[in-house]
Amino acid sequence: MTKRALKRQLRDGALDAAQFGDDSKVRRLPTARGWSPLPDEREARDQAYLKTIKAKSAGQERLIRAIDEKNLVLALGPAGTGKTYLAIAKAVEALEAGRVGRIVLSRPAVEAGESIGFLPGEMENKLAPYLRPLYDALSDRLSMKRVRTLMAEGAIEIAPVGFMRGRTLNNAFVVIDEAQNCTYVQLKMLLTRLGWHSTMVVTGDPAQSDLLPEMSGLAAVAERFEAVDNIAVVRLAERDIVRHPLVAEMLGVL
């Protein structure tokens, strides 16, 4: 720091003249500053990755409102409407606010129309490709370091559908993704996992099932739940697609 800069700070009142000695060639660096990169005891200097969730369409606004008001929500719609992203974003918001104690994310381990074959590694390595979209959505809301920390603490759990039987999910925010690849029996099992003080969001597109025809149970379950007042069924349309505009045009002709 130059002599002129120190004089300017002294003139502005940022420094104390008692910090300087009689020798004009020796200057002691100021020890008291208005800002320090070191964490203050009064406030945690943790990087905030959370962004404000804003609905980009009327359908997304209905979905956000349904998640806030209902304990069980079914979000049906074409690709690119933000079903999974909004569900995971609301899950992270509930966890950070302390409204739930953990997040449970699940999706069926079904190949997208092709046989991948044998995958090397342990069970976690075999299931990682199927669960990767959930990691991507989480990393967009939280830093990967925080995601790994929360997973190590058990606050975030990612599991395939096959590992959900027999569980009771209390004080949790549960997201069932790609539910169009679940059979009626699987969906019945998943929906009955809901416990006390929990919220469950089921997302999927009945038109893009990788199962054999008539095997997917999502459309049938959603049709029956529309008559239940305490369950919200939100149907998104092509006008709610927020990806590249070509996605909406393609889905309109495919």
Image (cartoon, rainbow, N blue to C red):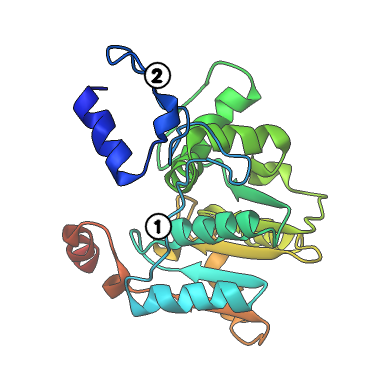
Q: Residue at x 55, y 35 (%)?
A: 39
Q: Quadrant of residue 230?
A: bottom right
Label 2 packing within 10 angstroms: few (<14), some (14-19), many (20+) = few
Question: Can you identify the residue that label 2 sits on?
Answer: 21
Q: Quadrant of the N terminus?
A: top left
Q: Quadrant of residue 68?
A: bottom right
The answer to whether residue 113 is visible is: yes
Q: Residue 181, how many percent across, how many down? A: 52, 53
Residue 241 to residue 35: above or below: below
Q: Residue 131, how many percent across, how many down? A: 52, 39
Residue 95 to residue 18: above or below: below
Residue 239 to residue 145: above or below: below
Q: Residue at x 54, y 60 (%)?
A: 216
Amino acid carrying mark 2 in the image: Gly
Of marks 2 and 1, the one in the foreground? 2
Question: Can you identify the residue that label 1 sits on?
Answer: 208
Whichever of callouts 2 and 1 sits on the residue coming sooner in the sequence is 2
Q: From the viewer's perspective, tell me whether residue 90 is left or right of residue 113.
A: right
Amino acid carrying mark 1 in the image: Gln
Q: From the viewer's perspective, tell me whether residue 230 is left or right of residue 65.
A: right
Task: Identify which residue, 125 or 9, lies in the foreground.
Answer: 9
- For residue 146, the mark is none
Q: Residue 192, how many percent across, how many down? A: 76, 63
The answer to whether residue 214 is visible is: no
Where disc 1 sits, the SS reads helix
Q: Residue at x 22, y 22 (%)?
A: 2
Q: Residue 62, how many percent across, how many down? A: 46, 79
Q: Quadrant of residue 71?
A: bottom right
Task: Identify which residue, 61 or 46, lies in the foreground.
Answer: 46
Residue 232 to residue 111: above or below: below
